[in-house]
Amino acid sequence: MKSIAALFSAIALVLVPCVSALAQGKPELTTVRLGVGGKPSLYYLPLSITERLGYFKDEGLEVEISDLQGGSKTMQALVGGSIDVASGAYEHTITIQSKGQNIQAFVAQGRYPGFALGISRARAPAYKSAKDLKGMKIGVTAPGSGTQTFVEYLLNKEGLKAADVAFIGVGSGSGAAAAVRTGKIDALSNLDPLMTELESTGDVVVMVDTRTTKGTLALFGSPMPAATLYTSKEFIAKNPRTVQALTNAMVRALVWLQKATPAQVADAVPPAYLLNNRDLYLASYLKVREGISPDGLFPREGVENTLKMLKEFDPATKAATIRLDDTYTNRFVEQALKTIKR
């Protein structure tokens, strides 16, 4: 009963009406297929909160969420047409444009990448910089995902290339933990709560951390948009009220998260997300809390720095003329913020 009461108390923090279907016009679609790579991770916490607190339903939407292995798999599903909208890393909207696809992010869930690079217990003593990654087997959520892009950026700063390491897709759950503990991989680029769990057991030593303001600014010099909702520009043009409804729901969740206590967050997510250790989940949440977007807006400096980062090591992006304004839009978030009290 105490847990239920806490959840209702948290919901009451944002007892303001969302933009109703009546006020903005009914969404063109009542059912939206949404894909995400590793939904239980804190990287996608705003999505889970939106779903759990019923904000999608409040907007007249039935959102069918498919949990895929990683960000690259989610993008493949979007381009292939098996999902309508993706929850994934912002940088995918840039890299896919270099391949001729017009994908646009319309609400930001995170303002810091949230990735951490952990070196296995056996290899950690010899690690001094990313140069020491050469020859290592590095676990990522999925090949081509944001967790891999993060490592490629680190390698490039040391004059190395992706080919100098072996990337292995291990997901973001128990399979990734097992890969570390059995010696299948030497290092792991991943997300919380997994990384905090492996830190707490001493299985990895985190060497590079973008879960916090300090770590992100030290590496990139500015906030960097992380998880977003994105879809094709064609879908947005055909279904603007549906995209607005999705955005309204997500922004409500972001506002809720700014006011909720850690305990209320833990009460709101599915019990399985707690990994049978509520205290560990709370510790993980506190590490990433400041990286959650407060409002869903994309900072121009952040998107520009994302493009700059990718051009440093991704040949396709470097060779392409990227229309940065086509990779994101703030117009749906700006509309949502007009109706939601902060």
Image (cartoon, rainbow, N blue to C red):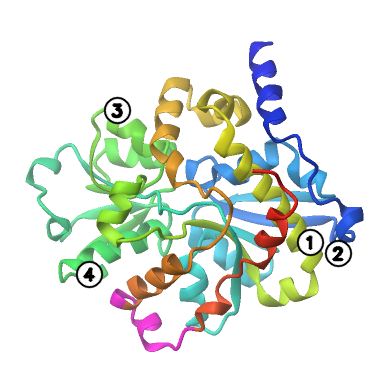
Cα gap from disc 2 to disc 1, whole angstroms: 6 Å
Q: Is residue 53 left or right of residue 239?
A: left
Tag 3, which secondary structure?
A: helix
Instruction: Nearest to the eye among marks 4 and 1: give it.
Output: 1
What type is the residue that disc 3 sits on?
Ser
Where in the figure is residue 129, as x and y percent of width and height? 13, 55
Q: CA distance from mark 2 to mark 3?
A: 47 Å
Q: Going by the image, does 268 lie left or right of 130?
A: right
Label 1 sits on what residue type? Answer: Thr
Residue denoted by label 4: 156
State the residue position of label 1. 242
Seen from this angle, which residue lies furthest top? Answer: 1
Which region of the structure is painted magenta? Answer: 312-322
User: Residue at image x 18%, y 69%?
Assistant: 160
Q: Which residue was labeled with disc 2? A: 28
**Which badge, 4 or 1, comes first in the chain's sequence?**
4
Dot placed on the residue nearer the N-terminal end, 4 or 2: 2
